[in-house]
Image (tube, helix red, strand yellow):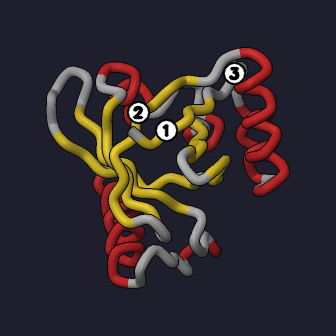
Amino acid sequence: MSEWNDWNQQIIDEFRSSGGTVEANGFGRNLVLVHHTGARSGTERVSPLMAIRADPDTWLIAASKAGAPDNPAWYHNLRAHPDVAIETPDDGEVAVRAEVLEGADRDAAWERFTTAAPGFKEYEARTTRTIPVVALRRR
């Protein structure tokens, strides 16, 4: 777990020091830093996540967890505490509300992820769960 936390911290540090551009893994300017509160612990956390800008006030994130059988912790945290902040490459810090997309809205958003980064299709093939997509809407 420590190795994963170290990798995340390196991504966060690069994001902040470069104004939102992350060269590691070719992320470029496609990440947001999601500030969230632990659903059970109440601990504040920051997760770097690939985001697709749906419109000027909405960012989409996918709870892929690289195709693991369970959803990532941040997903549960956003469901418990949906009013959060994100750091973006272009808008700085933005207050948002997290909304889990359902049905056709989720499917259309998921298609955007698999088109933008084919690795998401691999994640989908690794798991039996439907990978949630969350819209982060400016408050």
Q: Amino acid at mark 2?
A: Arg
Which mark is first along the chain, 2 or 3?
2
The dot on residue 9 is none
Which mark is first along the chain, 1 or 3?
3
Label 2, label 1: how far apart the Cα atoms are: 5 Å
Which mark is first along the chain, 1 or 2?
2
Determine whether the residue tagged by mark 1 lies in a helix, strand or loop. strand
- Marks 3 & 2, CB-CB < 8 Å contact: no
Q: Residue 51: x and y, percent?
A: 58, 53
Residue 11 visible in rendering:
yes
Q: Residue 55: x and y, percent?
A: 64, 49
The dot on residue 130 is 3
Q: Which residue is mark 2?
A: 97
Q: Residue 105: x and y, percent?
A: 73, 25
**Residue most toward the top?**
103
Label 3, label 1: how far apart the Cα atoms are: 22 Å
Within the image, what quadrant is residue 79 found in? top left
Image quadrant holding the C terminus, namely top left
- Residue at left offset 29%, top offset 39%: 36
- Marks 3 & 1, CB-CB < 8 Å contact: no
Q: Is residue 22 above or below residue 48?
A: below
- Marks 2 & 1, CB-CB < 8 Å contact: yes
Within the image, what quadrant is residue 64 found in? top right
Left of 90 or right of it: where is 120? Answer: right
- Residue at left offset 52%, top offset 61%: 31
Q: Amino acid at mark 1?
A: Arg
Label 3, label 2: how far apart the Cα atoms are: 22 Å
Q: Which residue is mark 1?
A: 137
Q: Residue 134: x and y, percent?
A: 56, 32
